Image (spheres, rainbow, N blue to C red):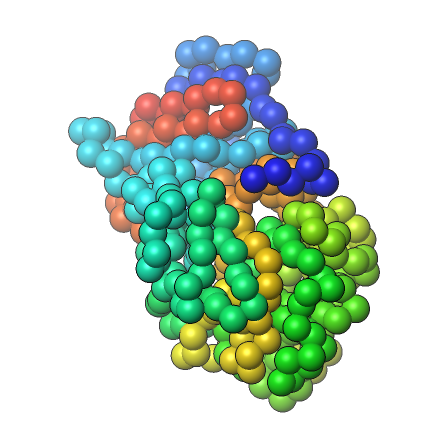
């Protein structure tokens, strides 16, 4: 898929680290880390680019001094038995803050389903003849995808939608029964809905059970070319944001309270419950239960591909929820992390 309007891929250097870490309680560990944890550096090139800081109460803390992307991540016990991994497509068994990841890369010649690579296996059912080929899906204005299982996810705090799409805005049915918009992503009435408006802008529609709030992009959809759109909701700030390509971000505070979503209700791609169908192509869908920082959004946009939230590393400390790996406090685990240009191998970790 050619998304020429988007930026270049973020690159990182090569690093091989062998370090020592244990699962401990949180007691000012970051400021005192150098005195609390012993690190043996076996080989190091281009400075200390990435390191594992600690694992505390099912949270893994990674530090990076550059913007980067994790292509493969694995935790195994001291006997070599795998606990969890991500970045392996359908073989990913890590369940974290990435709730849906669809790239359509493994969808050639599949006429019934599209696959979720998030680890939760919320696979999609193709409805009314959605045509998925060459790693993208084509929507004709009368078909859609139902995401099986995601209807049970309750977005009561942070959430993010990200989509790459392409279409002719003059061919959209903005005179549909409910008028003025077509839907890219939708999850019932009270959930976040990501739309394209008849003004050729993208819009996120959210509700807090008493009133709706709509935030539209400040710039226009690029006609007949690939567009990157991301909606970002920060629970603590009561803030909705929408990003379209490289244009300015549009924001709105929810002064009436935070938003949420019904726990039931079918999650749909390419339409909503009112029959607002999208016509065109969709590639790369991500849904996260964690708000993204500006640097993380920039990395995701530049990579030109949907990634797991856990793969996106901006400069500084990143916290990754590893509860699905079932790590035991006091035990020793091996970490292997592949970045764009190198491998980080954490052999054993003790306090």
Residue 345 lies, with reference to residue 199, above or below; the image says above
Q: Can you give x and y, in whole percent of width and height, for residue 309 in the image?
A: 51, 48
Q: Residue at 54%, 75% (x, y): give it.
A: 272
Quadrant where the C terminus is found in the figure: top left
Quadrant where the N terminus is found in the figure: top right
Residue 163 lies, with reference to residue 1, above or below; the image says below
Residue 38, picture quadrant: top left
Would residue 39 appear left or right of 81 to someone viewing this image? right
* Residue 56 visible in the shown view: no
Residue 147, picture quadrant: bottom left
Q: Residue at 44%, 52% (x, y): give it.
A: 132
User: Which of these two is toward me, 171 or 297?
Assistant: 171
Residue 181, picture quadrant: bottom right
Would residue 65 appear left or right of 217 to someone viewing this image? left
User: Which of these two is toward me, 60 or 158?
Assistant: 158
Would residue 148 appear left or right of 313 to someone viewing this image? left
Q: Residue at 79%, 58% (x, y): give it.
A: 220
| Total numbered labels placed on residues in the image | 0
Q: Can you give x and y, in whole percent of width and height, for residue 305 in the image?
A: 55, 42
Q: Can you give x and y, in whole percent of width and height, for residue 233 in the image?
A: 63, 64
Q: Can you give x and y, in whole percent of width and height, for residue 57 in the image?
A: 38, 50
User: Which of these two is toward me, 201 or 322?
Assistant: 201
Q: Residue at 37%, 28% (x, y): give it.
A: 336
* Residue 92 visible in the shown view: yes
């Amino acid at each position: 898929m050619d998304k020429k309007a988007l930026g270049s891929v973020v690159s990182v250097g090569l690093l091989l680290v062998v370090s020592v870490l244990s699962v401990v309680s949180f007691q000012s560990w970051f400021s005192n880390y150098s005195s609390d944890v012993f690190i043996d550096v076996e080989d190091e090139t281009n400075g200390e680019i990435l390191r594992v800081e600690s694992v505390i109460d099912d949270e893994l803390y990674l530090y990076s001094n550059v913007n980067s992307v994790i292509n493969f991540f694995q935790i195994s016990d001291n006997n070599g038995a795998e606990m969890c991994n991500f970045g392996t497509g359908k073989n990913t068994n890590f369940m974290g803050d990435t709730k849906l990841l669809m790239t359509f890369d493994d969808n050639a010649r599949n006429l019934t389903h599209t696959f979720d690579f998030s680890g939760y296996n919320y696979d999609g059912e193709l409805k009314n003849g959605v045509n998925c080929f060459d790693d993208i899906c084509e929507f004709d204005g009368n078909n859609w995808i139902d995401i099986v299982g995601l209807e049970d996810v309750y977005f009561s705090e942070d959430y993010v939608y990200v989509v790459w799409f392409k279409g002719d805005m003059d061919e959209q049915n903005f005179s549909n029964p409910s008028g003025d918009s077509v839907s890219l992503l939708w999850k019932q009435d009270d959930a976040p809905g990501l739309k394209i408006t008849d003004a050729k802008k993208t819009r996120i529609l959210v509700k807090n059970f008493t009133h709706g709030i709509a935030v539209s992009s400040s710039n226009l959809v690029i006609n007949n070319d690939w567009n990157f759109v991301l909606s970002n909701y920060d629970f603590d700030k009561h803030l909705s944001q929408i990003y379209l390509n490289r244009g300015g971000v549009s924001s709105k505070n929810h002064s009436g309270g935070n938003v949420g979503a019904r726990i039931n209700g079918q999650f749909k791609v390419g339409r909503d419950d009112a029959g607002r169908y999208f016509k065109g192509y969709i590639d790369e869908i991500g849904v996260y239960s964690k708000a993204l920082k500006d640097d993380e959004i920039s990395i995701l946009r530049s990579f030109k591909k949907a990634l797991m939230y856990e793969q996106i590393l901006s400069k500084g400390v990143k916290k990754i929820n590893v509860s699905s790996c079932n790590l035991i406090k006091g035990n020793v685990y091996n970490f292997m992390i592949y970045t764009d240009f190198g491998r980080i191998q954490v052999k054993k970790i003790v306090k």
